Amino acid sequence: MDAAGGRAGSVLSGVAVALPLQITFRHMDPSPALADRIRTLVSRLEKFDARITHCHVIVAPPPRHSRHGALYDFHIDIALPDQVIAVRRAHAAAPGHKDPYVALRDAFRAARRKLEDYRRTRRGDIKNHSQPPRIRRRKPEV
């Protein structure tokens, strides 16, 4: 069980999450409001791709001794049957990441983009360049 209590089939504030969800708050007290927002965003990802088997979100607050603008950091690991998609430092230097909800939004947007890339690859929409490119040789002029 995690700090926020997210497990399969949990419902909090009307948001149902059917997949196992783990939310870890590092170096901070758990925030029920932030955990609710994470559950909402995970449920949206679950609707986007039903093959997700597990999701782990790590919330890291800004360091207390930082002088250069303290920014929140979110790590998201999404487990699929054949791959794990990891999101680290989505727009890490963005000044808006002083607000945890902005940093969370950007992290989940990056996760969705990676899921879209994964789905394109699985469908075969992305070309596989397993064969070396052919080199066309010019015929010598006579």
Image: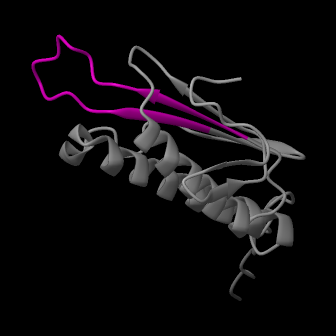
Name the residue at the bottom extreme: 142
The residue located at (17%, 16%) in the rendering is 66
Q: Give the left or right position of residue 51, taking residue 103 as reference.
A: right
Q: Give the range drawn in magenta.
A: 55-76
| Colour style of the rendered protein structure | one colour
Q: Residue 105: horizontal and vertical position, in percent?
A: 41, 54
Front position in the image: 62 or 92: 62
The image quadrant where one finds the C terminus is bottom right
Q: Residue 14: horizontal and vertical position, in percent?
A: 59, 59
Front position in the image: 119 or 16: 16
- Residue 57 among those drawn in magenta: yes
The image quadrant where one finds the N terminus is top right
Q: Give the left or right position of residue 32, taking residue 67 as reference.
A: right
Name the residue at the left extreme: 67
Q: How many marks?
A: 0
The residue located at (77%, 40%) in the rendering is 20
Q: Give the left or right position of residue 58, taking residue 68 as reference.
A: right
Is residue 25 placed above or below 81 in the rendered structure?
above
- Residue 3 among those drawn in magenta: no
The residue located at (64%, 24%) in the rendering is 2
The answer to which image quadrant residue 129 occupies is: bottom right
The answer to which image quadrant residue 85 occupies is: top right
Q: Residue 55: horizontal and vertical position, in percent?
A: 70, 41
